[in-house]
Structures are given as C-alpha cells and as structure tokens.
Amino acid sequence: MSGNIGIGSWIVRRARMHPERTALVFGAQRWSYRELAARVVRVAHALSARGVRVGDRVAYLGHNHPAALETLFACGLLGAVWVPVHPGFEDETIAGMLERAEPTVLVSGPGLGAKVERVRRPVPTARVLEVTDDANQPSSYEAALAEAADTPIDRAVGLDDLAILAFSSGTTGASKGVVLTHGNLLFNALNVGSALALRRDDTLLASAPLYRMGGLGFLLPVWREGGAVVLVREDGEQGSLETIARHRVTILFDTVTAFERMRRAPSFASADLSSLRVCMTGGSPVSEDLLHAFGARGVDLRQGYGLTEAAPVVLISDHDDAPTATSAGCPPMFTEIRIVDAALADLPAGCAGELLVRGPQVSPGYWRAPEATARAFAPGGWLRTGDVAVADDAGRISILGRLADTLVLDGASVHPGPLEAELSASCVADCALVQPRAEDRPVLFVAWGARPSAPDRVLEVVHAHLGTRWAPAVREMEAVPRNANGKVLRASLRALAGA
C-alpha cells in the first residue's frame, strides 16, 4: 500500500497488522480484518470492471449495511469518490443528488430495487449493483464480488484527493454537496481518537445513519485504531440496550432523541451498561435529566458539536469536565475556532457571535459550487458555520442556535437556544421558539410529552428571558418536528406560525 495513504488503505493495513481481530459485526455475521479487507478488494475490482476510475463517483443508496462501508473503502482503494444517499429522502431530492453527482455506479441496499428505478432517470448510464438475496440477478452485488479478482490494489491516493461527496437534506435551504478529502477524514479521526482516548480493544455501536457524517465521524476513528464496529440498521432503544450488553460495547454515538428513547426504555434501570466507556451525542440540546439518568448508571455521556463541512467534529466535551446541558465542549487537538461579530471581529468570553472553524479536517468547499464555497469562508481560511456560540471563561463553548434563527426584538438579536434549553430542562418535553418575520411577535411551540402541563412555569421562564413586552404566543403540539439529525425544522414552524 505504499502509494495509497488515504482511508482506502486503512482496512488493508489493519488486516496486515491484526488479521484475525474482529472488524465488523452485523446481525449474526462477523468479519475479521482479514475477511473484511478481502471483500473490500473484491468490491474495488467489481467497481473497476464497471468503469470506475480515479475521481469517478460511486453512490450508495441504502440504510446501514456492510455494503455501504465496503463500497466506501473500495472507492478509497481506487481513488474514487463515495456518495452516500439516504433512501428516506423524497424521490425528487434523491434524483437531484444523483444528477449532480453523476455516479458511474449506483450501489443500492436491500429491498430498494423499485426506488432505484424511480430515481435513476437523471443518470441512465450508471451501472447498478443491488444488495439482494437473488444471486442470479444480473445486478447482484454478491454475484459481482464472487466474479471479481482478489489481487491487491496499490493505486496512488493522497490526503488532498476527494474521498466523500456528502449532500445535505436541504432542510435549511437548497441541498449542498460537501466534498471531503482523505486528509479531512484522517484529521477528524486523529481529533476524535485523541479526545476519546480510543483503544484497540474498543467496540463501537454504530446505530447512527451512515449517510450522515456524524455516524462516520466516530466509526472511522475506531477502525483507524483497530477496534471493532457493531453495525445496526434500525435498532430501537430495547435492542440497543441488549446489543450493548451482548457485544460489550465501549463507545456509542447517537442523537439526543435516541438517548432519550433509550433512557425511557423499561429495562434501562436494569440493563448491563458496565462495558460503556463513553457515549457521545450532539445536534440538539441535552437536558439535565438525560445527563443525570446516564450519570446515575455510571455512563459518561458527553456532548459535542460538528457539521459535515468539518468531517464533522468541531467541539467535544472532555472527560475531566463535569458534564453540563449547555456546553458542547472545546475544540480538539487539530482544530481552531473563533467567535466573531457581524464584522468578523473577535468577541470576548460571554459575548455571543458566529462560530468560525479552521483546521485540516475542514472541507475545501462545495461540489461544483465556487460561489457558495467563497461565501462559506472568511479571510484566512475560516469556515463560517452559521451557528451562534458563546464561550465561558474556561473556554468551553455553548451553541445557542443557527444565526438564521435569531429573533429580532426591538432591533436587538435574541437567540432562542438558552430559553429552549431551560424550558426543556424544567417543564416541557420539547419546545421551539420561532419568529415568522423580523419584529413579529414570537411563537413558542411546546410539546408536554409525559410532563404535566405547567403554563405558569413556561411564562415564568419566558419572561425571564424575553421580558413581558415580547412574551410569545404559546402553541401546543404533540411533538416538535425534527429531522433525522435531531434538529428542529424551524422553517416549517415559521411557516406554521405565520399562518
């Protein structure tokens, strides 16, 4: 592997160092590094036989499945670019992503043949490989592997070469294609490995969707260290608790919503969580109740903050810090941050402003979108995250929300994050504060969940944050709408509030 220093070589190198160590578990199946490396090489040959060359794109449309990871690493061996696409997106959205990515090959997960036929119209020349039980099907993924060569591949791939093209879901605007290099992924792995003190004997429960960089952002570091990954497609809270105990899971990353479901499971109090070293979450506020629930079980639940453009980790809580519901931690080893005002001047601790990030894990930009790339970066190579943050005197960072979600009240900027966090911690199951238009009266959407209705307490918190002049209209709903990442769909709520 002398010519390949990208992620495609990681599994092959680990197979050389620790061939019989467990690399991947999926259901009843288990692969050692030697076995997984052999499959990755065959996938690479199968893709090459279907026309994939350096720089070509290979799309994977499907839920969590070993084929997704095999395809990712096979692309890395060939110098091709992996494009993950979630099947839960609307057909029109997926078709648009494929049209922009122009994949040479489209690999689909189990049971998605009909969807593939609906969405592949913009790329009629793309060859299809389908994960299916029917080995006689012409497009069978497993049949292609069986026919592929198993000879080593040593193609030159460097850290500046593109590895992943990740499309956003477009919930906050037009979908953007974020390009990530092999170097971006390597330095994210180094950041995460250092912050979590990853070890060769770690086992990660990979329950977060692989189309999101949050899922891959913790999976890849574990494999770089030579650990094991237990991959699950859709595992409810009960299944996750059982999986943790059965496989002696040490690392778990998932959304706040997933951890909330887990702690509400009837078996949470008695589940064997003794193997867990650390749990990571992010994407939405964490309640004090959730932190205390896991802390009472002896589990180190930490927050972090990231975005696809940073591959993805920007902030991560340190083990030495007492966990808090507000802090997302500090930047890891190879990451720099700034908090700035509208003129991009640095702000002191305690002042809220836009978070900027710089480091070798930050994307070089957006796919075939030079204007969007130019807008995303401030002078000096600083990525503008579009998120509002504030630092305390110890350098810990709290994320207050999106810059675009800031309320304007009497000409002053008000961030909804602190109000929402206090309400969620004290008297509601979930909430979101939005403003249809600047200077409009805000609207607070509240979901009580299992908590008893406490309108007086809600008003008390609201008045403490906004005063009485701008007290919002309060609307109750069964559940605050969130996307797959756990983020509030504020555009939908603003439209509802305006109506």
Image (cartoon, grey):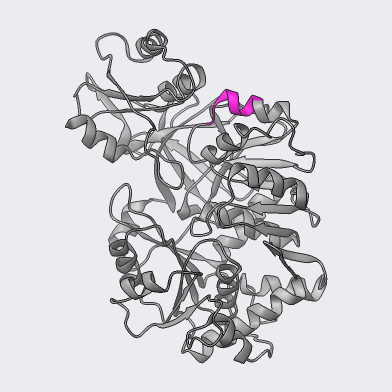
Image quadrant occupied by the C terminus? top left
Foreground: 412 or 148?
148
User: Where's residue 415, x and y in %?
Assistant: 36, 27
* The quarter of the displayed image where residue 233 is located: bottom right
Is the stretch drawn in magenta largely helix, strand or loop? helix
Q: Residue at x 37, y 72 (%)?
A: 114
Is 328 positioned to the left or the right of 195 in the image?
left
Q: Residue at x 58, y 23 (%)?
A: 288
* The quarter of the displayed image where residue 353 is located: top left
Image quadrant occupied by the N terminus? bottom right
Q: Which residues are magenta?
A: 286-292
Is 35 positioned to the left or the right of 414 in the image?
right
Relative vertical location of residue 351 with respect to residue 358 in this rendering, above or below: above
> Is residue 413 at all visible to an observer of this figure?
no
Q: Is 416 a magenta residue?
A: no
Is 349 positioned to the left or the right of 341 in the image?
right
Foreground: 6 or 248?
248
Relative vertical location of residue 256 with respect to residue 455 in this rendering, above or below: below
User: Where's residue 224, x and y in %?
Assistant: 70, 62
> Is residue 291 at all visible to an observer of this figure?
yes
User: Where's residue 367, x and y in %?
Assistant: 37, 66
Give the tally of numbered discs.
0
